[in-house]
Amino acid sequence: MKAVITGGAGFIGSHLCDHLVAQGHEVIVLDDLSTGSRANVAHLEAHPGFRFVHGDILDRDLVDDLVAQADTVYHLAAAVGVHTIVDNPLKSLRTNLHGTENVVEAAVAHGVPYMVASTSEVYGKNDADGLTEDSDRIYGSPTKSRWSYAAAKGLDELVAYVHGTESGVPCVITRFFNIVGPRQTGRYGMVVPRFVDQALKGRPITVYGTGTQRRCFGSVHDIIPALPRLMATPEAYNRAVNLGGHEEVSIKGLADRVVALTGSASPITYVDYEQAYGEGYEDMQRRYPDTSLAARLIDYRPTRGLDAIIGSIVDHRSAPVPQPV
Ligand code: UDP
């Protein structure tokens, strides 16, 4: 089988490359290296089943040409990270809206089953105790920059879903809940690699807001095997499926854990949201996944707790050679 992975040089995409190549599949990566890195897939470059294409998902002809060669498409390319979205709102919208349209339309045109990666961000400010796939979306004002990402990814889901139902081409939408692990960069937001880097460098740990906001971090190693399994499960077609972990922590609690696990002398400092992200930023207080649908469909059971996840990131920072999943 041959898979096209858009965003395959990114954090999640590169782990998916490892997994599929290890299973004997051929992989073509399409990545513009805007937030991804060639280093994430450098260990695969000599593999005969692996090909890297440097290009943009906004390039319709290129997307069409690559998708036409594939048996499956995993669409992971996106403008991601709160800092990316806030700093480059227009480019982010274009990539996330039109890029996804290009990929989905190519997949449908060639009859190639496709997965579109989405995000828990689509639930917006809904802080229900266990967000199910049917939970409501609650977005703030359009003048608050962060919601443009949620709105765009929500539309991506619709593009995927409507094309999937109208064409009959298998389509799976995965909603990732704060997935973290080795190779994730903190440069564009993402709190866990930021805190780990700050702790290892002895710099202040920057907790934004009060630090009472809560997140549930999931391991990339838990979610990757779930992706091809969902693609092979007809009951998963034309629906969104939550994927994430189950250990919830406050951001202040996360900072304490990172300091303890790294033995760092870094102090914890509190930074106003306005200072961190600019004017008009709005955070969400809580985001906790209900993953019972994935459990029922593919027996998805996340096994890695937060300490193990932080430990794997620390190990990777100390020995930065990408390891296969
Ligand atoms: N955050 C923080 N310090 C940082 C980066 C992020 O306290 O250096 C906070 C951020 O405001 C949010 C949480 O950590 O409350 C998770 O942020 P991230 O960008 O990783 O994910 P998301 O906001 O999309 O859940």
Image (cartoon, grey):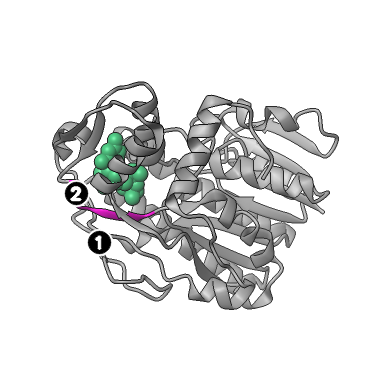
The answer, for residue 151, to whether it is visible in the render is no
Secondary element at image label 1: loop
Q: Is residue 234 above or below residue 115?
A: below
**Quarter location, residue 272:** top left
Mark 1 lies on residue = 125
Q: Magenta region: which residues?
A: 211-216
Note whether ligand 1 is within 8 Å of mark 1. Answer: no
Amino acid type, mark 1: Lys
The residue sitting at 51% across, 68% down in the picture is 241
Q: Residue 50 location in percent, x, y?
A: 78, 37
Q: Residue 321 location in percent, x, y?
A: 63, 27
Q: Residue 296 location in percent, x, y?
A: 58, 78
Mark 2 lies on residue = 282
Q: Quadrant of ligand 1?
A: top left
Contact check, label 1 and label 2, Cβ < 8 Å: yes
Query: Which one is earlier in the sequence, the residue at label 1 or at label 2?
Result: 1
Secondary element at image label 2: loop
